């Protein structure tokens, strides 16, 4: 499924969690935003794989939101680093491949779901972990369908969280 859609990249300066990026992508026209928190808050380079934590879907209001957040919402301040339209090459339950042009994110990226989960300290709920990867070449359906490779990579390669 290929389509153009809206997105926003926030920098969230949270009092407890520290500075991180929140990437939000609209997955249906006029609808909710799928959201990932990226603790490292940087564009992955080369073969670097960054941790991305799936968070709850957000209202489309967040496409334009900037400002202070209260206690229940990651208390701190949220800035818009980049927003606009992106081209989504593939969207499944376990892989999102997209291309975006901008100052902070520029190029082709993939978000790949792993088998590992993190426990949210606040709610004790399990959160999905994903890899956020910058692609050097065009990613095809054939090399993303086999998630065994990605789960192997997740188990055997370090994830940079500095």
Image: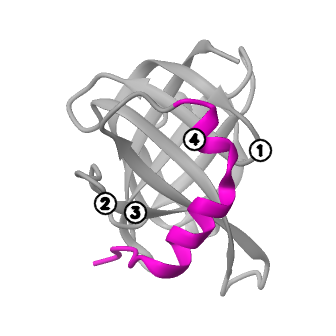
SS type, badge 4: helix
Compute the Cα span from label 3 to label 2. 6 Å
- Asked whether residue 77 is in view, the answer is yes
Compute the Cα span from label 3 to label 4. 19 Å
**Which of marks 4 and 2 precedes in the sequence?**
2
Q: Position of residue 143 (x, y in %)?
A: 57, 41
- Who's the residue at 69% across and 43% down the image? 145
**Which of marks 4 and 3 precedes in the sequence?**
3
Compute the Cα span from label 1 to label 4. 16 Å
What range is drawn magenta here? Answer: 140-162
Mark 2 vs mark 4, foreground winner is 4
Q: Position of residue 48 (x, y in %)?
A: 31, 60
Q: Which residue is mark 2?
A: 48
| Residues at circles 3 and 2 in contact by the CB criterion of under 8 Å | yes
- Asked whether residue 64 is in view, the answer is no
Q: Which residue is mark 1?
A: 93
Q: Which residue is mark 4?
A: 143
Q: Which residue is mark 3?
A: 50
Q: Nearer the viewer, residue 155 or 57?
A: 155
């Amino acid at each position: 499924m290929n389509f153009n859609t809206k997105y926003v990249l926030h920098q969230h300066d949270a009092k407890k969690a520290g500075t991180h990026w929140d990437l939000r992508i609209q997955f249906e026209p006029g609808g909710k935003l799928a959201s990932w928190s990226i603790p490292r808050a940087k564009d992955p380079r080369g073969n670097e794989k960054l941790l991305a934590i799936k968070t709850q879907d957000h209202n489309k209001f967040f496409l334009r939101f900037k400002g202070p957040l209260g206690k229940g919402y990651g208390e701190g301040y949220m800035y818009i680093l980049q927003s606009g339209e992106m081209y989504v090459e593939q969207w499944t339950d376990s892989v999102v491949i997209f291309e975006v042009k901008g100052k902070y994110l520029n190029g082709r990226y993939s978000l790949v779901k792993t088998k590992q989960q993190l426990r949210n300290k606040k709610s004790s709920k399990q959160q999905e972990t994903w890899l956020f990867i910058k692609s050097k070449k065009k990613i095809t359906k054939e090399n993303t369908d086999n998630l065994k490779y990605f789960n192997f990579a997740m188990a055997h390669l370090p994830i940079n969280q500095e």
